[in-house]
């Protein structure tokens, strides 16, 4: 694999691992459900799910049994992460809406149903040609959940930015919603490229070099955004607060 492409994958793996572990550890101190949900989401989709599938692709070519096992474990982890993000989207942004709760539950039920269908039909043997209909449908729903979260975070950032101008919101927290929107959006768009390509070509998307490069680039953007949101360096925090103070003075 091209070293530049590998950088994107490694950045996404280690950033999501660090952020996910931190958020889950934070839950054990605060007992707040959002921290747990987003921590599980980041870990399940990133280092565990993505990591297992990449390991299966790279190291399981000569051992079909090992490759199937890694793909199965990766699929379970990704499903768990997506379900956690789906619940997070409802719980954080629409906790009082019965309609959105029903939507989140229906989306989760569809994801589980497609997962079980794939488990019984293919046993998670990697697709040799174009992905199956159930695999593509599950991928499309996962992309939809990621982009849903990105749009919700962006909408909330706009609301928080208005409150910040009135001195009612902390600049770092406000900026975190924007960064989360960028990170989830990058992950969703990267997955969307692979899903759409899988509908068009007659081979697994991870075997297409430009799709792999796209996934790496989107993963790198997601890694930077997640790191700045949840593991920001002191210089970045000073910049955000200083920029907010200048904007307040100008107003």
Image (cartoon, grey):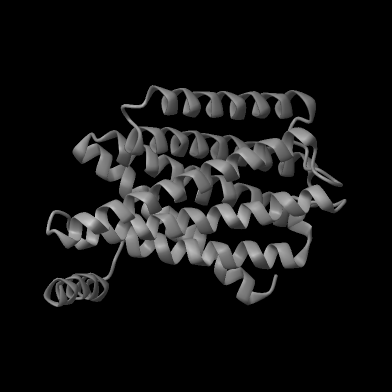
On screen, residue 107 above or below 197? above
Quarter of the view holding residue 132:
top right
On screen, residue 40 above or below 12? above
| Residue 74 in view | yes
Q: Nearer the viewer, residue 98 or 218?
A: 98
Q: Is residue 137 left or right of residue 36?
A: right
**Residue ranking furthest to the front:** 251
Q: Residue at x 53, y 59 (%)?
A: 186
Q: Residue at x 44, y 55 (%)?
A: 16
| Residue 9 in view | no
Where residue 123 appears, as percent x and y from the top left, is 75, 30
Q: Is residue 143 left or right of residue 86?
A: right
Q: Quadrant of the N terminus?
A: bottom right
Q: Residue at x 65, y 52 (%)?
A: 192
Quarter of the view holding residue 66:
top right
Where residue 51 appears, as percent x and y from the top left, is 58, 51
Q: Quadrant of the C terminus?
A: bottom left
Q: Residue at x 84, y 46 (%)?
A: 130
Q: Is residue 210 left or right of residue 103?
A: right
On screen, residue 14 above or below 87? below
On screen, residue 39 above or below 218? above
Q: Is residue 112 left or right of residue 198?
A: left
Where residue 230 appears, as percent x and y from the top left, is 31, 57
């Amino acid at each position: 694999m091209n070293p530049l492409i590998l950088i994107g994958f490694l950045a996404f793996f280690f950033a999501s691992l660090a952020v996910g572990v931190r958020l889950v550890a934070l839950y054990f101190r605060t007992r707040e459900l959002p921290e747990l949900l987003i921590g599980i989401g980041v870990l399940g989709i990133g280092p565990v799910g993505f990591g297992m599938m990449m390991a299966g692709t790279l190291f399981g070519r000569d051992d079909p049994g090992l490759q199937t096992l890694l793909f199965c474990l990766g699929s379970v982890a990704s499903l768990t992460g997506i379900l956690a993000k789906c619940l997070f989207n409802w719980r954080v942004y629409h906790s009082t809406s019965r309609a959105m709760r029903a939507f989140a539950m229906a989306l989760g039920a569809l994801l589980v149903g497609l997962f079980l269908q794939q488990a019984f039909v293919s046993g998670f043997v990697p697709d040799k040609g174009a992905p199956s209909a159930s695999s593509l449908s599950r991928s499309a729903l996962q992309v939809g959940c990621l982009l849903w979260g990105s749009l919700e975070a962006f909408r909330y950032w706009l609301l928080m930015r208005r409150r910040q101008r009135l001195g009612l919101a902390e600049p770092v927290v406000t900026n975190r919603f924007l960064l989360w929107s960028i990170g989830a959006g990058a992950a969703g768009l990267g997955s969307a490229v692979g899903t759409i390509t899988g509908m068009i070509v007659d081979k697994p998307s991870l075997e297409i070099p430009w799709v792999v490069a796209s996934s790496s680039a989107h993963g790198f953007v997601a890694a930077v955004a997640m790191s700045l949101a949840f593991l920001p360096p002191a210089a970045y925090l000073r910049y955000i607060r200083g920029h907010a103070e200048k904007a307040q003075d100008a107003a």
